[in-house]
Amino acid sequence: MAHRRGDRQRDTQRAHQLLGTRLLQRLQALQTLTEALQAHLPQGAIDHCWVVGYRSATLRVLTDSSAWVVQIRYRQKAVLKDINGRHGLSLTRLQVRVTAPRTEVQSPAHQLTLSADNAEVLRTTAAEIADPGVSQALRRLARHGSRRSR
């Protein structure tokens, strides 16, 4: 646990250096407000709704699905009352916007290759196997052998 705490402190210090104190305080405030919002939403909404700012008595929320807009609107009064009470704000309105869902960029799947030598081993093994189903499967696999390495 001490190791993690040290990592967190180091990360926080580095963030202070990179971002500056005011920006970091703003980010922490938005994170705190996001957690307060999420406490009022169903468990499934936690990864889909974020507070992105507040201005002129309006709490601005971003979500990745219109289905969550309904959930947020339904709980709007309780959310605003809770946030105002806990954080000393005077928010009277909630503005919700829908954005495209967050997606992670996935690297292309690694394509496996079969050398010509290994394909030959599969064909030889298939010829020696008595079970016709296994023999046929090995022959199908052997067809994927690289012809370039022969």
Image (cartoon, rainbow, N blue to C red):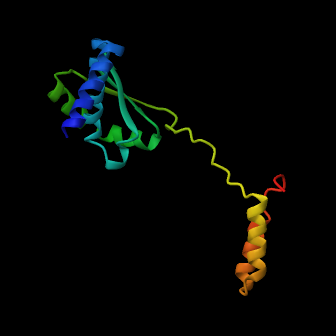
In percent of width and height, residue 67 lies at 44, 44
Judged left or right of residue 70, residue 22 is left
- Residue 145 can be seen in this image: no
Q: Quadrant of residue 121?
A: bottom right
- Residue 129 can be seen in this image: yes
Instruction: Please tell me which residue lies in front, 111 or 39.
Output: 111
Residue sitting farthest toward the bottom: 130
Q: How many marks?
A: 0
In percent of width and height, residue 91 lies at 25, 23
Q: Quadrant of residue 77?
A: top left
In percent of width and height, residue 4 lies at 24, 36
Relative to 121, say whether 97 is above or below: above
Q: Residue at x 26, y 30 (%)?
A: 8
Quadrant containing the N terminus in the rendered view = top left
Judged left or right of residue 120, residue 83 is left
Judged left or right of residue 101, residue 44 is left
Instruction: Please tell me which residue lies in front, 85 or 74.
Output: 85
Judged left or right of residue 83, residue 94 is right
Quadrant containing the C terminus in the rendered view = bottom right
Instruction: Please tell me which residue lies in front, 98 or 124.
Output: 124
Q: Residue at x 32, y 14 (%)?
A: 17
Q: Residue at x 52, y 35 (%)?
A: 100
In percent of width and height, residue 145 lies at 78, 60
